[in-house]
Image (spheres, helix red, strand yellow):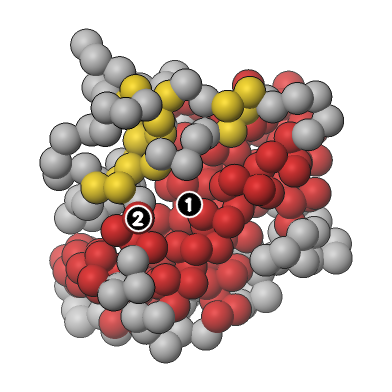
Amino acid sequence: MTDRDRGSGLDELGPAFAVHTHAAGAPPPAPWQPVSTLLDASGDAWRARTAAVRRALEGMAGRPVEERVAFATAHLGVVARVLAPAFALAVVSSAVPPPDVWWRPVPGGMVPVSFGSPVTPVAPGSLVDAFADSVVPLVAGLTEAAAGTNPVAPAILRDNSASALNSSVTMLAAARPALAGRAARLADALLRRPPWSIAAPDVGAGFRRNSCCLIYRLDPGPPRPVCGDCVLR
């Protein structure tokens, strides 16, 4: 089994953290794509991803789904799949992935992600800065590229990534209670920085978005489906 076929071990923490790995200089084969396809100014990859998510949501809902709902869901799905394993890697191993990140388009469900290996070890006390200098700019770049393809409010996309980061804390704490404090401290420090700049994040179960991810529009209810951290709760 090659590096590109072998998981990182983070899948033991739960499916949200599962990530493939590939050796530096040996990218995974098609249909894997470099994350740069999602950073491309043309927006083609984001439009294709939104269309795929829309078809999947319509199949589940049994009714037409607004494009902006599919777009917001597609964006949340991608940034969460980049953030969650990178965050777990930082908490568990005090390391950050290299910029060699790949993804694989799928019809629905979690987007497979592959990190280049080896990962970058971080000096003690530098983890927040290292994560903020490597992973956060990638997420911000993905968000900026996505925003150019759909007129969804920027606050929704910004809160998508904040929500993904906070969800990583709660899922990681559930999988490894001993790491709960370390995970919460890292997320708190990150959420206080740009692009989020939340003065009091209230990381964990108390976290609330300032905008809705629009998923409630999939079902008119009642009750309407809202996420645990939704501003509408």
Residue drawn at point x = 52 percent, y = 57 percent: 139
Residue situated in front as seen by the camera: 16 or 85: 85
Where is the N terminus found, in terms of image quarters?
top left
Q: Is residue 82 visible?
A: yes
Q: Is residue 226 visible?
A: no
Residue situated in front as seen by the camera: 194 or 171: 194
Which of the 4 image quadrants contains residue 229?
bottom right
Which residue position is annotated with label 2?
36
Q: Residues within 10 Å of mark 2 (few under 14, many from 20)?
A: some
| Label 2 secondary element | helix
- Classify residue 31 as left or right of residue 85: left
Task: Look at label 1 and name its amino acid.
Answer: Ala
Between marks 2 and 1, how big is the CA–CA gap?
17 Å
Residue 94 numbered mark, or none? none
Percent across and percent down for residue 12 are: 46, 21
Residue situated in front as seen by the camera: 135 or 192: 135
Q: Is residue 117 above or below residue 15?
A: above
In front: mark 2 or mark 1? Answer: 2
Percent across and percent down for residue 106 are: 20, 51
| Label 1 secondary element | helix
Where is the C terminus found, in terms of image quarters?
bottom right
Q: Is tag 2's residue or tag 1's residue first in the polypeptide sequence? A: 2
Residue 80 numbered mark, or none? 1
Which of the 4 image quadrants contains residue 50?
bottom left
Which of the 4 image quadrants contains residue 124?
top right
Q: Residues within 10 Å of mark 1 (few under 14, many from 20)?
A: many
Residue drawn at point x = 21 percent, y = 43 percent: 32
